[in-house]
Image (cartoon, rainbow, N blue to C red):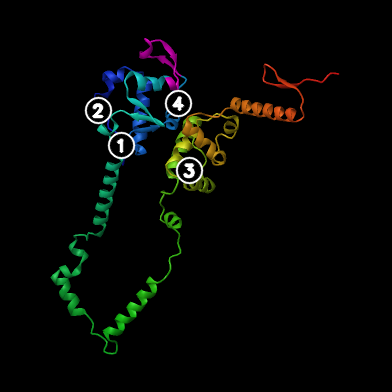
Amino acid sequence: MPHIQLDLEFIDHPKTVSVSPLAQLLFIRSLIYCSKHLTDGFLPYGAVSSLTYDLIGYSEPNPTHNGIVGEVTMELLKNELICVNKWWTEANGGFIVHDFLEYQLSRADVEKIKDRNRLNGSKSKGRPRNNPTDNPTDNPEITQNITQEEPKANPNITPLTITSTITSTNKKENTKKDNTSPADKKISAGKVEAVGAETWEAYREAYNRRYKVDPVRNHKVNSMIKEFTEKTLGPVEAPQVAAFYLTCSQPIYINSRHSINLLIRDATGLRTQWATGVKATRTEARGEEKKENITEQLKRRQANKVPIDITPNNEAIEYEERI
């Protein structure tokens, strides 16, 4: 199981005390993220939003600002980790956690451990139990009793006939088709592991942080989460986008209390916002709509050869032709 390692000197190390407590917490969260997702120390831009969701907006004394109390922002926390103690380094598409592979397990290390555990588990399953009572022939007295009480073979039934009967029966049993799907086998065996389990857990944790209650889960929700993970975004990005979704504050999301339906509907747009680190807002949408409206008015007026002008408020107006 992936985990992180922290030195016992971390809590009072000069680098640690040089940044605010919230920046220290963000650094530990970045270690957990990289270890959980086996990124070898790479932290994408989109992940920072979900890691700092409940850290920003507070007011606290900041050692990088001479103890002045100020509002905590995402940029301020990133600046502390990048510029003050250099725990993060900017890279293409995100950040690199300093000396991550020197103290934490790499992806290759984790894969080797999993393979070794899997191999050891398969060997232990095939190993016979050392219990003398399991095999009655290990006890001479029992063997003697069995030999004495063994009934005589029926002369009318040859061993060949018995063997052929058993063999034919086994062949019929082995040739039966198993039409049970892998999903049905998991359900019948009572296993909770399923495609999308990590996505659901990321969504549930973020939902609980925002609303202080777990979301509703039923068969329909499970099917939607599975499709979202398998067919829409994939098992790597789906959990991160699901957690990012809970940080978005568009009115439609808040009114629906961030329902699964809207996560599925807006999956592509949410993934773009998560990957770029830029959230869509109502102001941005109104600006784009206004810009498009002005452009279309210009095209129509130019086609009709009507003089136009643009007001200081970016509104297109017509000049009336006077004779």
Type of the residue with mark 1 = His
Q: Separation of disc 3 and disc 4 at Cα?
A: 25 Å
Which one is earlier in the sequence, the residue at label 1 or at label 3?
1
Gap between marks 1 and 3, in whole Å? 26 Å
| Outermost right residue | 323
User: Where residue 104 sits: x, y (%)?
Assistant: 28, 34
Residue that appears at 65% across and 29% down? 292
For badge 4, the amino acid type reads Asp
- Which residue is the site of mark 1? 3
Q: Are marks 1 and 2 in contact (CB under 8 Å)?
A: no
Q: Which residue is mark 3?
A: 233
Q: Nearer the viewer, residue 173 or 128?
A: 173
Q: Nearer the viewer, residue 314 or 308?
A: 308
Label 4: few (<14), some (14–19) or many (≥20) C-alpha neighbours in 10 Å: few
Vertical comparison of 10 with 145: above or below: above
SS under mark 2: loop
> Which residue appears farthest toward the bottom when viewing the image?
156
Query: Are the two marked residues, 3 and 2, in contact with CB atoms closer than 8 angstroms?
Result: no
What distance separates the C-alpha of mark 2 from that of mark 4?
A: 26 Å
Mark nearest the camera among 3 and 2 is 3
**Which of these two is toward me, 313 or 103?**
313
The amino acid beneath tag 3 is: Leu
Q: Which residue carries the number 4 mark?
A: 54
Sort mark 3 into few (<14), some (14-19) or many (20+) by Cα contacts within 10 Å. some
Q: Earlier in the sequence, mark 1 or mark 4?
A: 1
- The numbered dot on residue 7 is 2
Q: Is residue 164 left or right of residue 307?
A: left
**Residue range highlighted in magenta:** 58-75
Against 166, residue 311 (above or below) is above
Which residue is at 29% across, 31% downward? 100
